[in-house]
């Protein structure tokens, strides 16, 4: 959408057409940020894949540039925690409203319910074929997304078509995706959210919210590690942030738990974690630490048991089976290799063919980075495609 707007603004005499597979534009925008649309990020860039290329495309301050673009379209933007930018309304539909209004004002042509079946290049002209129609153009922008969340319009179906046009691709996998884990140690915790530090295979780390589910774990801190997951990986949850002790060492945990035992010797196990964790999570920690005795009072917990409990809070281990897959992923890794494109224009090594957004081998962390790269690359492609 932004590529089409930029092209028409750059050269109003040019004929610009958007071909959309679904019944409406922007379904991914409408579900972004749980409907609040985390549109940009004002902080340091956080990207994966062809990172250097992503930084070249974004330039020194993509946030300020794109903020001005959207303000000119009529959208006001505000910043929340972690430098995340949202429409001031916190409603994704207001982002769509300004884009659609501009598309209408500029008289950009639109075809909905028109999945592209094939693209053929003859000399300098592209023939774009849908089920009902065919279109000829000299400049073609493929803003077809990645493979994640196919129900919202991106399923990778045009990757083979783009490959026939000469593009090479890096293999894809789900990213920003819930994780499938062994659920025996988290049985009964589904729906509970906690703050945690998460590490995968003692190599990759993330911090933030973790959501326990009946299949494993979700939440931003877990989802950001999906790109690294393989069957057999091991997740460690540091649950100290969940009880306000993120910066405290094991000795502090031992001291707190020991005092509980001393103060409430005749109480049962839930009293040990009262005020620290909810009862269900406290029970899971107790069982995970290897203490399986039932109906015991706190006075029965030995000193070495307290150390095991503290270790479990710091390193709650879960074995990983995989991810929930593309249907549940927010973005996918991989895509068209970026050494085939000019970062200043987004034109590919196939003259007249441009690619933008997630179809490229660039993906970002959760926090507005993926939309920001899509918008900036769309602006560049639209402006350059309409120049000559």
Image (cartoon, rainbow, N blue to C red):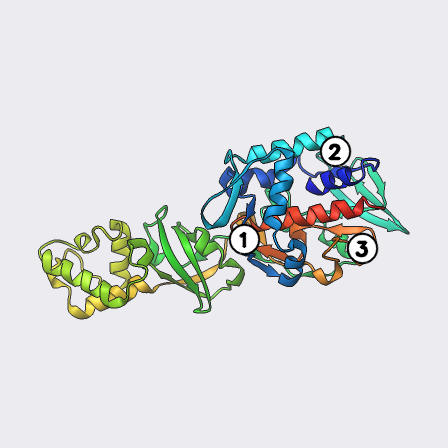
User: Distance from label 3 to label 2 (Cα)?
Assistant: 24 Å
Q: Is residue 334 above or below residue 385?
A: below
- Relative placement, left or right, of 209 versus 15 is left
Q: Residue at x 67, y 55 (%)?
A: 57
Q: Position of residue 184 (x, y in %)?
A: 35, 57
Residue 165, which numbered label? Answer: 3
Tell me if mark 1 has few (under 14), some (14-19) or many (20+) residues whose alpha carbon lies within 10 angstroms of its own. Answer: many
Residue positioned most to the left: 266
Tell me if mark 2 has few (under 14), some (14-19) or many (20+) residues whose alpha carbon lies within 10 angstroms of its own. Answer: some
Q: Quadrant of residue 216?
A: bottom left
Please tell me whether mark 3 or mark 2 is closer to you in this view.
2
Residue 365, which numbered label? Answer: none
User: Distance from label 3 to label 1 (Cα)?
Assistant: 28 Å
Q: Is residue 37 above or below residue 196?
A: above
Tell me if label 3 and label 2 are in contact, CB under 8 Å.
no
Q: Which residue is mark 1?
A: 325
């Amino acid at each position: 959408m932004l590529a089409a707007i930029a092209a028409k603004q750059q050269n109003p005499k040019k004929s610009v057409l958007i071909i959309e597979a679904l019944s409406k534009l922007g379904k991914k925008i409408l579900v972004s940020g749980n409907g609040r649309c985390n549109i940009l990020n004002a902080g340091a860039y956080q990207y994966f894949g062809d990172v250097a290329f992503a930084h070249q495309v974004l330039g020194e301050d993509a946030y300020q540039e794109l903020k001005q673009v959207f303000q000119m379209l009529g959208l006001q933007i505000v910043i929340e925690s972690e430098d995340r930018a949202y429409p001031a309304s916190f409603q994704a539909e207001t982002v769509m409203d300004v884009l659609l209004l501009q598309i209408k004002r500029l008289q950009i042509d639109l075809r909905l319910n028109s999945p592209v079946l094939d693209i053929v290049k003859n000399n300098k002209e592209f023939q774009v074929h849908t089920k009902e129609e065919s279109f000829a153009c000299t400049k073609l922008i493929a803003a077809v997304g990645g493979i994640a969340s196919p129900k919202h319009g991106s399923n990778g179906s045009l990757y083979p078509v783009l490959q026939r046009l000469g593009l090479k691709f890096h293999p894809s996998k789900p990213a920003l995706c819930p994780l499938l884990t062994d659920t025996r140690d988290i049985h009964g915790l589904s729906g509970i959210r906690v703050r945690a530090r998460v590490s995968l295979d003692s190599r990759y780390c993330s911090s933030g919210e973790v959501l326990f589910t009946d299949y494993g774990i979700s939440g931003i801190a877990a989802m950001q590690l999906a790109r690294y997951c393989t069957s057999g990986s091991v997740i460690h949850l540091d649950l100290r942030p969940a009880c306000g002790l993120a910066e405290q060492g094991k000795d502090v945990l031992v001291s707190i738990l020991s005092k509980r035992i001393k103060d409430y010797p005749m109480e049962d196990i839930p009293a040990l974690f009262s005020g620290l964790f909810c009862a269900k999570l406290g029970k899971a920690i107790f069982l995970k630490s290897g203490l399986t005795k039932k109906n015991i009072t706190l006075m029965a917990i030995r000193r070495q048991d307290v150390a095991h409990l503290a270790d479990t809070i710091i390193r709650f281990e879960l074995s990983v089976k995989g991810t929930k897959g593309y249907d549940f992923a927010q973005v996918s890794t991989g895509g068209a290799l970026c050494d085939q494109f000019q970062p200043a224009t987004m034109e590919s090594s196939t003259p007249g063919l441009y690619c933008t957004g997630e179809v490229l081998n660039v993906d970002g962390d959760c926090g507005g980075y993926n939309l920001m790269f899509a918008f900036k690359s769309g602006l560049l492609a639209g402006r350059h495609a309409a120049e000559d």
